[in-house]
Image (cartoon, rainbow, N blue to C red):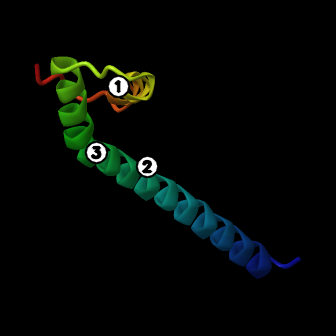
Amino acid sequence: MTFRAWQTLVVALLFALVAAVGSMTYTNAAARESERKCCGIVSTLDDAYAETPPQTPAGQKIATDIARLRSDFTCPPTR
């Protein structure tokens, strides 16, 4: 391979690396924004279930899952 071919290969690999890092950064930022938007809904539901606990097994499971989701999203407490 000539020096020019090596240069082209290195530039192409660097471009691919920069594109991959940029794509991962954007995806992570979009995921955090999505989770932040969900916090309002999850917090409201969790607060509602805490005020009036459900009586049915299905309702209790939903309340438990919503509380776990709130913790997973690290939503701030509103109580």
On the image, which quarter does residue 13 sit in?
Answer: bottom right
- The residue that mark 2 highlights is 28
The image's mark for residue 50 is none
Q: Amino acid at mark 1?
A: Ala
Residue shown at 74% from the left, 81% from the top: 4
According to the image, label 3 marks what residue? Answer: 38
At label 2, the amino acid type is Asn
At 66% from the left and 73% from the top, the residue drawn is: 12
Q: Which of label 1 and label 2 is nearer to you?
A: 1
Relative to 32, say whether 15 is above or below. Answer: below
In terms of image quadrants, where is residue 8? Answer: bottom right
The foreground one among 14 and 25 is 25
Q: Is residue 60 above or below residue 6?
A: above
Q: Element type at marker 2?
A: helix
Nearest the viewer among 59 and 33 is 59
Label whose residue precedes the other's in the sequence (3 or 2): 2
